Amino acid sequence: MMKKSKYLLALLIGVASLSSCSKSWLDINVDPNTPSSTVASVDSRLAWIQHYYLYAQGTAGARAGYVTQQLSFTNSTASNSMIAGWNPIAGMSTTPYQFFFVGAGANFSDLEEKAKKENAYHYIGAMKAIRAMGFMLMTDWYGEMPYTEALGTAITPKFDDGKTIFEGCLKEIDEAIAYLKMEQPATATALSAGDSWNGGDVSKWIKMCYGVKARWLNNLSKKSSLYKPDDILAALNNAPASVNESTIVNHVDVLGDNLGDILFADPVKTSIIYDNVGMNSNILITKWYENLLTNFDNKNVEDPRADKLIPWAEYGIPKKMVRSKGVDMQSDIRMKSGPIVASYNAKDVAITSNNRSVAPHSWYINSANNARWGDTVYVSFRSTSIAKAEKTPDIYKWDDGVIAASGTFYSRPDAPTHLLTVVEMNFIKAEVLFKKGDKAGAFAAYKAAIQAHIDLMNLKLSTYGNINQSKSPMVQSKIDEFINKGIGTAADITLAKIMTQKFIAMSFTQQNWNDMRRYDFSANVYPGWSVPYEYTVTAAAKTKIPDGKQFRRVRQVSHEINYNAQSLMASHPNALSDDIWSYPVWWDIAE
């Protein structure tokens, strides 16, 4: 697969030449009938590298949400439903690998070669940063992975261990910083011509690089000889210190963006979380996640973000907006065929469903099992999209105009991707300072992180106006009440408060799974969290994640199993075992 990705490059460029994006990030102005690798400019390559990397990390983050119980799924044999039950199947593995290696990685060497010819140092720096971020995602996800021989001429590249990949990525992020600090000649292509993340702002790229470095160094918390709090704090000193210095990818939902890319037919300009979550009516929040937002730390002060992160729908006559309930993953609901996606009678007359009458313009569950009739309380993350030629606006509605799902902050097609922000940096700082015994400093960073996340959300929410409870800015009175009464004080700050608030702010990210693994899924760090009930009574799940172990990695993709089996088998003694899902990746092994 590593070598095949090189041969797909011309095809990717061909698709790119036929596509368009706001600010022309994904345009290549060449004859679409004769696309080739040689005509692609550094700016057009970078835009597509960014797109494919974002899809890899966004898909990984969404799937991590099922592992960590931010998300649940209606009971089925679909891959995401199986992940939610800690009974994973091969379908979980492929997409992050494909999008990173085939979409992004296939362009790295050619971009670097062209950039060197024109001394476009900033493009080399950006490429090296994304390369490092992508390979770190791969080792977070799969553990061992081809790295030193990846994306080259080797047909069966060797697998490197996690330590080699981790150290290599740290080296590459330092190289990225060095290139980004260089002054480009005026003749070189300006970074702004191809940068869809930071608009060519080199200082933001540098801060982003220091930010991911701080993240990775903090992920070494189980490695006593390698975990160096002062090095983390030093990296944080050069990372984003404000919302304006953060790397935020702004997505758009526009007509004509339904061509898609070479790997999936999803729109290319919409939010990756929309592509993975917002298109689907089967994805629901969990009760644990709902509880974090509605009664954090048992203080009976609701988080103002709850309305924006939990889906809403219209119920009753007259219709009234009601917020979704969360699926209790510690109950047996999914073992009893639930939850079932709700139906709706949009007609002006009653209809019959399973020998009962359903009133006009009302919700119902189309099942003979009356134990499931209460599942109408669960609202999905579903949104609609102009890009997919669906109804506008992006609020999903029944045929009579009643709101079936409001969408949520991160799952709408125009939702931003918070790629690297001051929010995460402050949470890392809070964790490090807490461990150093500086409770006052930890609380100050923790409080600043929560406030910054609220501010960051309100930047986008304020662009909508006041549409409904979900699609409107948070009001200052609720913000003040939560900050002053809901998050605790310096005197009662705990690691659990820091990590659960970080979990909220890092919704839909791979880092939440990284953090849970670092703390061994501890209920002391994540109060109220426990493995899914169905896992405890499902024999097949326990062959993959035996009793006493946890969901620690993803099994390697079929491409490596089918085409590079010898290298794969040499990488880990259990590489092809059913229980490989339960083996920690390198940084997750205590030393």
Image (cartoon, helix red, strand yellow):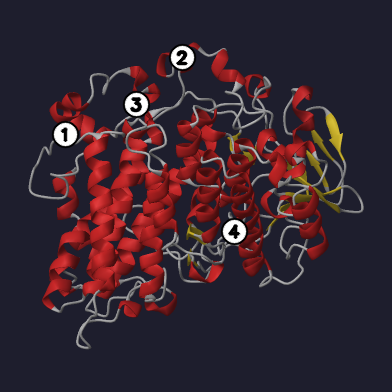
N-terminal of the pair, mark 4 or mark 1, is 4
Name which residue type carries label 4.
Arg
Depth check, mark 2 against mark 3: the one in front is: 3
The residue wearing badge 1 is: 563
The residue wearing badge 3 is: 591
The residue wearing badge 4 is: 412
Name which residue type carries label 2.
Lys
N-terminal of the pair, mark 3 or mark 1, is 1
N-terminal of the pair, mark 1 or mark 2, is 2
Task: Give the quadrant of the C terminus.
Answer: top left
Q: Position of residue 546 (x, y in %)?
A: 44, 14
Depth check, mark 2 against mark 4: the one in front is: 2
Name which residue type carries label 1.
Tyr
Secondary structure found at label 2 = helix
Depth check, mark 3 against mark 4: the one in front is: 3
Secondary structure found at label 1 = helix
> Is 312 situated above or below 219?
below
Q: Position of residue 195 (x, y in %)?
A: 36, 72
Q: How many marks?
A: 4
